Amino acid sequence: MKRLILSVMLLVAAVGMASAQKFALIDMEYILKQIPSYQQASQQMESLSKQWQSQIEARANEAKKLYEDYQKSANTLSATQKTSKEEAIVAKEKEAAELRKQYFGPEGELMKKRQELISPIQDAIYNAVKEIATQRGYDAVIDRASAQSMIFASPRIDISNEVLAKLGYSN
């Protein structure tokens, strides 16, 4: 009985090894650094982000200034003046929050710009990887840059340079 179980386990192990999967690696950070249009798009996104952030901070600072002025003069204001000033502060804070949402929200300007500038580059990389994987019979292609638990991988299974060549970039 023990021999039968051992034989079955060895047979299962042999079948598992015979149908081993083929893997390849890419380094998405490396690939993106080699693509000039990605670098330009990233710089443009960074510039827009800084510009929009400064607009938001300006509105927030205006609200802060209104609040500080209110605190200084709160003792001398009538109830209606206090209410008016408080409403102005809240409106300015709300304006800053709405601006933040407009620029950086899930459907904001930054996401739209990202879709416009970076998504086509990522799609081209994906299609190149898919084509190489299909041609070579890879079952999985793993991104080395995002695989946090990967300790070591042989450089011979890294197809990043092939992806760049497929995209028309020399390395």
Image: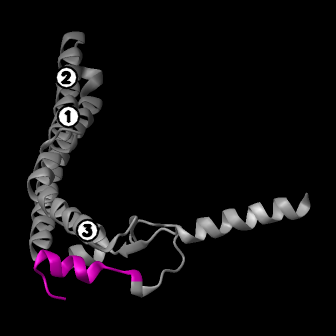
Place of residue 104 in the rendered image (x, y in percent of width and height, measured from the top left):
21, 44
Residue at the outermost top position = 80
Q: Where 170 falls versus 149 (above or below)?
A: below
Residue at the outermost right position = 1
Q: Residue at x 8, y 53 (%)?
A: 116
Quadrant in the rendering for residue 26:
bottom left
Q: Residue at x 23, y 62 (%)?
A: 126
Place of residue 74 in the rendered image (x, y in percent of width and height, measured from the top left):
28, 24
- Residue under circle 1? 66
Relative to 58, is 18 on the left or the right? right
Residue type at tag 1:
Leu
First-in-chain label (3 vs 1) = 1
Q: Which structural element holds mark 3?
A: helix
Count the numbered circles shown: 3
- Residue under circle 3? 129
Give the extent of the magenta segment: 157-171
Place of residue 93 in the rendered image (x, y in percent of width and height, measured from the top left):
22, 32
Mark 2 and mark 1 residues within 8 Å of each other at the beta carbon: yes
